[in-house]
Image (cartoon, grey):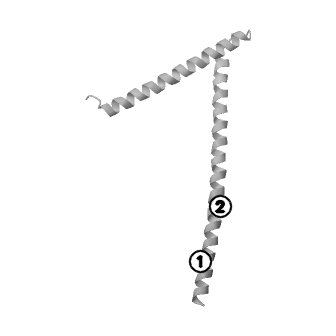
Amino acid sequence: KIMDNKNLNKVENAVNEVQWKVDNYADRARDYIQQQRNENKEPTEEGWLNEVKNNVADAWEDTKDAASNVWAESKTWANDTWEKTKDAAEDVKAEIKKATN
């Protein structure tokens, strides 16, 4: 069965994404090798993998910081909204009490 255009586009997009990632890592590997040579050091696979690991760790820290900020802001918003809702409910109860007395 021949793939329809929608599925073909998905496959092409996936291939393009993989190609971009491969090209990106190739550029980074080349930069690592050049940096090591500039420092009169021998570039190694272990060194390269450590470089990648550090980049991933940095990205995780950035993600964690962003998620923590969102959590704090959401929690503050939720608490504020809860307090306003409680206050509004108390106001409504007071108005009902006034109206019925």
Q: Nearer the viewer, mark 1 or mark 2?
A: 1
Vertical comparison of 24 with 5: above or below:
above
Residue depicted at 63% across the width and 76% down the height: 90
Q: Amino acid at mark 1?
A: Val
User: Quadrant location of residue 54?
Assistant: top right
Question: In which quadrant is the C terminus drawn?
Answer: bottom right
Residue depicted at 33% across the width and 34% down the height: 6
User: Quadrant location of residue 77?
Assistant: bottom right
Residue at the disc numbered 1: 92
Residue at the disc numbered 2: 79
Would you say 10 lies left or right of 37 here? left
- Residue 11, how many percent across, how many down? 38, 28
Residue depicted at 66% across the width and 12% down the height: 34
Question: In which quadrant is the N terminus drawn?
Answer: top left
Label 1, label 2: how far apart the Cα atoms are: 20 Å
Vertical comparison of 72 with 40: above or below:
below
Residue closest to the far bottom: 101
